[in-house]
Image (tube, helix red, strand yellow):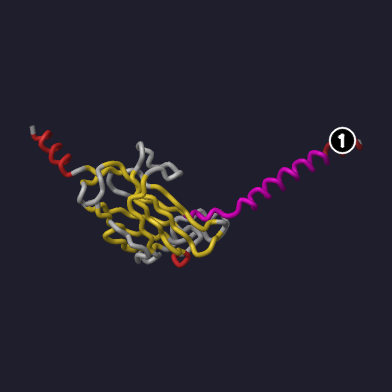
């Protein structure tokens, strides 16, 4: 009888330790705040000299618009078609720093305009009982001048910095998909070939 009680209590103790371990892992993992950035190019090609208009969406998760300190935008010429390498392979062609309202902080050569399009409250946060999960989504429209760009593959790198860290998040960075700048002459040659 004592032996069966020890076995029964032993199983209960092991079960209790497993439950405590799982709860401890969940608590240490902390809340999911869903601070994310997305770049929507809307095109895969742009003719040299034409403007490239794209959107930068910053989903703030548990953060608010006032938490954004600055946004850093880089245009990078891709090396060997490796546009999304986290090591930032490629040559920085344009660098631009702007504040949360879209006002330029640095000289943004080649950037014609940055407009704060919208601040949408109650964005798509994760929630899961941690924080409120109903942060804001901020959308910027950027117009890039391609006059001085060589033909080739490029991508946009965007990093948003926050004034204060929340759940260890101070910044978020993302690379867009690549796009190709084609020369005007190539466009005319392609049209002539199609017409024949």
Point 37% across, 66% down: residue: 101
Per the image, the residue denoted by label 1 is 4
Left or right position of 116 against 130: left
Specify the farthest residue to the top: 196
The image quarter in which residue 45 lies: top left
Give the mark count: 1
Q: Quadrant of the C terminus?
A: top left
Specify the farthest residue to the left: 196
Indicate yes or no whether the magenta region holds residue 32: yes
Point 37% across, 53% down: residue: 74
- Is 7 located above or below residue 106 in the figure? above
Classify mark 1: residues with Cα within 10 Å, few (<14), some (14-19) or many (20+): few
- Is 144 located above or below residue 104 in the figure? above
- Measured as percent of width and height from the top left, residue 46 is found at 23, 46
Point 21% across, 46% down: residue: 47
Label 1 sits on a secondary structure element that is helix
Q: Quadrant of the N terminus?
A: top right
Specify the farthest residue to the right: 2
Q: Nearer the viewer, residue 92 or 56?
A: 92
- Measured as percent of width and height from the top left, residue 71 is found at 41, 59
- Measured as percent of width and height from the top left, residue 126 is found at 51, 53
Q: Main secondary structure of the magenta part?
A: helix
The image quarter in which residue 18 lies: top right
Indicate yes or no whether the magenta region holds residue 36: no
Left or right position of 191 against 19: left
Q: Nearer the viewer, residue 140 or 187?
A: 187
Q: Nearer the viewer, residue 27 or 157?
A: 157
- Measured as percent of width and height from the top left, residue 55 is found at 33, 54
Stretch of the chain drawn in magenta = 9-35
The image quarter in which residue 152 lies: top left
- Is 33 located above or below residue 183 in the figure? below
């Amino acid at each position: 009888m004592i032996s069966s009680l020890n076995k029964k209590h032993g199983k209960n103790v092991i079960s209790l330790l497993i439950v405590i371990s799982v709860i401890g892992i969940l608590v240490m993992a902390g809340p999911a705040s869903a601070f994310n950035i997305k770049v929507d190019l809307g095109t895969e090609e742009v003719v040299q000299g034409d403007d490239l208009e794209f959107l930068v969406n910053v989903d703030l998760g548990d953060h608010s618009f006032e938490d954004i300190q600055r946004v850093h935008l880089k245009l990078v010429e891709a090396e060997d078609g490796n546009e999304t390498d986290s090591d930032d392979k490629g040559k920085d062609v344009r660098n631009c720093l702007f504040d949360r309202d879209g006002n330029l902080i640095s000289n943004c050569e080649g950037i014609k305009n940055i407009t704060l399009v919208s601040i949408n409250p109650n964005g798509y946060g994760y929630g899961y009982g941690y924080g409120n999960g109903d942060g804001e989504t901020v959308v910027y429209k950027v117009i890039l001048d391609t006059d001085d760009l060589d033909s080739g593959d490029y991508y946009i790198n965007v990093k948003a910095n926050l004034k204060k860290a929340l759940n260890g998040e101070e910044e978020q960075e993302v690379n867009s998909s690549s796009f190709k700048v084609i020369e005007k002459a190539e466009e005319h040659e392609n049209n002539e070939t199609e017409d024949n």
